[in-house]
Amino acid sequence: MKYFRTYFFLFICLMAAPSAFSQVDKQQELENKRKAILEEIKQINSLLFKTKKEEKSVLSQVEDLNQRISASENLIRVTNQQANLLTRNINDNINKISTLRDELKVMKADYAQMIQKSYKSKNQQSRVMFLLSSENFLQAYKRVQYMKQYAAFRKKQGEGIKAKTEELQQLNSDLISQKKTKQKLIAENEQAKKKLTQERKDQQDLVATLKKDESKFTTQIRAKQKQADEIDRQIDALIRAAIEEANRIAREKAARENANKKPNESTKNTVTKAGKTEEFALTAEDKALAASFTSNKGKLPWPVEKGMVVKSFGTHQHPQFPNVTTNSSGVEIATSDNAEVRSIFEGQVMSIQVIKGANKVLFIQHGDYISVYSNLATVSVKKGDKVSTKQTIGTVAKSHTEGRTVLKFYIYKNKTKINPADWIYRM
């Protein structure tokens, strides 16, 4: 019966091993998430709450506070998941420790009985007589082997007891460590909850300010959206013009090449016909560059070294005014003052324009893709320049009315706007 319990315990351990590894992986995954959220909160505080003296519109304050509240809620949720998983691990370890102690008790009792029997028969003369009483040489040989096996078994049992004792000590150590980690997480969570309570109170105060004069602020939001739409229209028009210009040059070049050909030579027109300017007429080099850009989807670097998205691509309902919707043709990235802007991929500077409300706007062509960098204070390249991936192309301008340094970033495929978050690594 005692051997059955030993084997049964070993079977349970083997079955539980994959689950234990799974829990370790899950704990590590949650810890990585927690660290990422803490880094996000650090960035929010650094980029959006640089100083309490920073002049900022009420709308900007609400938007920034929403970012921090959302991150704080995520932190509390992930920390709770970690604490719950640790609780399960602690309970599992307590059960393992209890089972191991029972097993160790049985093993020590078995070992003690064996030692007693061994002590009674330890007399060298008894062993010699045991061998000499053999009926033949084969039996004597077998008795020698038995004595060796018995000694080896006793040694193995002793090692087993030692291993079990060490395992028990390790589990106890893990248990103490897990309890300390859990207590630390709980303490951090309590602090995060206190901060979140204060942030929600600040948010309610700001929202109350907005609600007092809702018509004024909704007018501001719509005016800001109208300005953004006008900037988008100008950018769209500039891209259409660039495509038309590129195709005009390509048509003229093709016409010259055709004029130089002999009359009996067959010609193949690969250039977009006049009047059709939906797409760029690409050279073989442009096509290779576009293919390389496509293959890097989801892996392209951020246009700033340090930043966070404060407005994502697409249509959004305003959190405080449900009857107001806003649309973003790109993404808005808050960054540090005087932050350098860098090209997300190799290409050629297609155009540099000054647009009212967007400061300087830089266009870089990557085959039939275009990356657009809006709200630049300075530009360090010129039209026609070849640029490389991560090359500095300018700096971001700071808005004195909103108290933020924000880059508006777009990606186009020909004339079609596409979501930058699908292309930039972990955006």
Image (cartoon, rainbow, N blue to C red):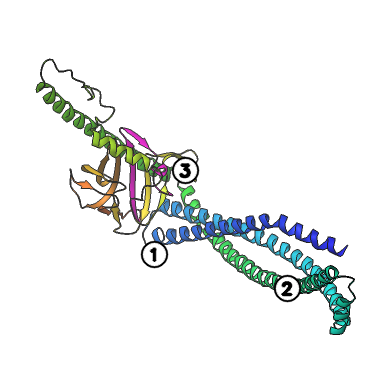
Cα separation, mark 3 vs mark 1, equals: 26 Å
Q: Nearer the viewer, residue 163 or 388?
A: 163
Neighbour tally class for label 2: few under 14, some 14-19, many 20 plus, Cα within 10 Å: few
Looking at the image, residue 402 sits to the left or right of residue 73; the answer is: left
**Residue 419 part of the magenta segment:** yes
Q: Which residues are magenta?
A: 403-426
Q: Is residue 124 inside the magenta stretch?
A: no
- Do the CB atoms of the residues marked 1 and 2 lie less than 8 Å apart? no
Q: CA distance from mark 3 to mark 2?
A: 68 Å
Q: In the image, what residue occupies the spot 83% across and 68% down?
A: 138
Left or right of 244? Residue 324 is right
Disc number at residue 51? 1
> Is the residue 259 above or below the residue 390 in the image?
above
On the question of residue 255 being in view, the answer is: yes
User: Circle 3 sits on which residue?
Assistant: 318
Residue 277 lies, in percent from the top left, at: 25, 26
Residue 122 location (% of width, % of height): 85, 82
Query: Label 1 sits on what residue type?
Result: Thr
Question: Which comes sooner in the sequence, label 3 or label 2?
Answer: 2
Residue flagged by tag 3: what amino acid is it?
His
Tag shown at residue 293: none
Does dot 1 land on a helix, a strand or a loop?
Answer: loop
Residues at discs 3 and 1 in contact (Cβ within 8 Å): no
Can residue 397 be spotted in the picture? no
Residue 307 location (% of width, % of height): 38, 55
Quarter of the picture holding the N terminus: bottom right
Spot occupied by residue 232 in the image (x, y as percentages of width and height): 31, 38
Q: Mark 2 — residue?
A: 159
